Amino acid sequence: MVPVLVVEQWQRTAYVGQTAVLPCHPTVEKDVDWKYRATKDDFEDYVYSNGVMYERFRDRFSVLKSNDHDYDLIVSNVSWSDAGQYICIEDMGLGARHIYDLIVTGKIALL
């Protein structure tokens, strides 16, 4: 079994209704896959692969490709169900992983 190389891991917090940006700056100039799992024990679901956004995520998710090899995942109108772990995997799933734990919180009402 080939060891998995984790290059970066972060936590991001987003408010419900906000837009969250999860940057991915691969170390190689090859396509990436974005995957999601609700908890660390869940299976990873594809969000984006081979230039295609998967059906479940198409309404509010997009990938901003820039500089020929940056693949930022954009989550619009964040909802509670978006919380979880997002993983950008380099080189079509064979390379390093960039991991984000997305924490979703409600808006604070000012009295």
Image: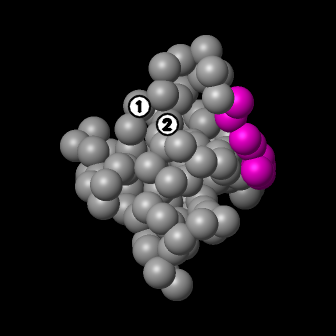
* Left or right: 35 as drawn, with respect to 8: left
For marks 2 and 1 on the same chain, the one whose residue lies earlier in the sequence: 2
Q: Position of residue 79 (x, y in %)?
A: 47, 43
Q: Position of residue 106 (x, y in %)?
A: 62, 44
Is any part of residue 53 visible from this angle?
yes
* Left or right: 52 as drawn, with respect to 7: left
What residue is at 31 percent from the left and 55 percent from the top?
50
- Mark 2 Cα-neighbour bin, 10 Å: few <14, some 14–19, many ≥20: many
What residue is at 61 percent from the left and 15 percent from the top?
41
Check disc 2 and give the amino acid type: Tyr
Magenta residues, start to end: 3-11
Marks 2 and 1: CB-CB under 8 Å?
yes
Mark 1 lies on a secondary structure that is: strand
Tell me the tag on residue 36.
2
- Mark 1 Cα-neighbour bin, 10 Å: few <14, some 14–19, many ≥20: some
Check disc 1 and give the amino acid type: Asp
What residue is at 61 percent from the left and 36 percent from the top?
85
Question: Outermost residue, top direction?
Answer: 41
* Mark 2 and mark 1: Cα distance apart in space: 5 Å
Question: Outermost residue, left direction?
Answer: 55
Question: Outermost residue, bottom direction?
Answer: 67
Q: Is residue 30 above or below residue 102?
A: below
* Main secondary-structure element of the magenta-colored stretch: strand
* Left or right: 2 as drawn, with respect to 56: right
Q: Position of residue 25 (x, y in %)?
A: 63, 67
Magenta includes 19? no
Residue that numbered label 1 is attached to: 45
Tell me how the rendering is colored: one colour
Q: Position of residue 101 (x, y in %)?
A: 68, 41
Mark 2 lies on a secondary structure that is: strand
